[in-house]
Image (cartoon, grey):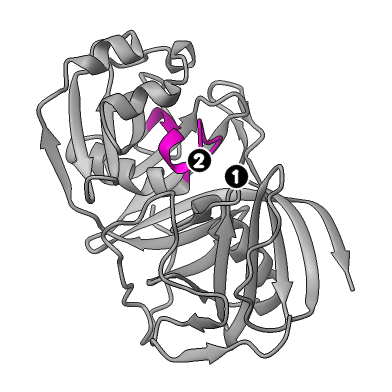
Amino acid sequence: MSPRVTKSSRETVILDARIKTGRCGDQDETTIRTSTDNPTTVNRTPDTVATHTLAAFCGTLASTGQSATGNPCRVDILSGPNAHAPPAAAITQCLTWALAPQRAQVRCWGVTGMPIALCGHGLLSCAHTWLARWQAVGTLVMGHTEVQCQAAGPLVWLQFPLVDIATVTTDLRLAALLDAQPLACAHVGAADGYLIVELAPDFPLESIAAPGQRLQAITDRALIVTCASSTALADADALIHCRYFAPQHGSAEDTATGSAMRILAQYWRAAGLGPRLVAYQCSPGGGLLYSAVEDNAVWIGGKVIDQDQHND
């Protein structure tokens, strides 16, 4: 069932229709603009209050024994706003700071140093960190998007707005790219948004070679490949599998992709799989993601492990 939600006056979420992995907003080196569009001038480099090295969307799927190492992320909690990107690193880096009680700003950068417009595993990692401090439901702000977050048992949950998904004619070149025959395709967002490709049930997604730059000859969209699984689950309506490729946005393949799960939750519900799904992301490291679709929102959940912590 869906996670229990505490209603608040800030529950309405603002959606940038072009949410994707890629360049982030119009922030410059001297000013941060919050979701209320009030500029906050950065007068000095803020202090780092705490640093956490985490893995998001990790765990073991009991019904199959598949394990997921999750997507690694470094989270720096700052004493105030920061407009400067951190140096490129081997894992995603997120900077976050308090805006108000139970409300925080988040900015994330990928391993290539590119800013990420909406980072699912970064938001989940930041939510895990802030929820431990707040001990209450809160809100994270990333670019023009506000995401409510809460903990429920071992999982952290993020609430996203619904998106428009449009079924499209299958590009015949995709069969050669994936060495598999697509059953259906759909688009989300603008021309550099997402392309969903559905394959036959129980297709071995691990066998697909990462398309790399060959993908750009077909589309500017990030590619989500997915299939249904015949494995029955006791605590969800269905199990799905997926992989995510976005070389044009600096990610040859993502380990565990919360922003993709938000889309797949809606896609598969429309296909009749039900509102509560579990997804195993068949990347080399593996990701384990959960979803619950409601009338006007979708919740994405996952387990976060704090691998290391340093406090000043």
Residue drawn at (35%, 25%) of the image: 215
Query: Is 238 in the magenta?
Result: no
Residue 156: which disc?
A: none
Foreground of the two, 126 or 44? 44
132 above or below 23? below
Residue 112: which disc?
A: 1
The three-letter amino acid code for the residue at tag 2 is: Gly
Which residue in the protein does label 2 denote? 250
The three-letter amino acid code for the residue at tag 1 is: Thr
Contact flag, marks 2 and 1 (Cβ < 8 Å): yes
Marks 2 and 1, Cα distance to the nearest angstrom? 6 Å
In what element is the residue under mark 1? loop
**Residue 51 percent coordinates (x, y):** 79, 64
Compared across the picture, whether 8 is left or right of 286 comes to left
Compared across the picture, whether 170 is left or right of 5 comes to left
Which region of the structure is painted magenta?
239-257
Residue drawn at (41%, 71%) of the image: 26
**Residue 113 percent coordinates (x, y):** 60, 51
Q: Is residue 131 visible?
A: no
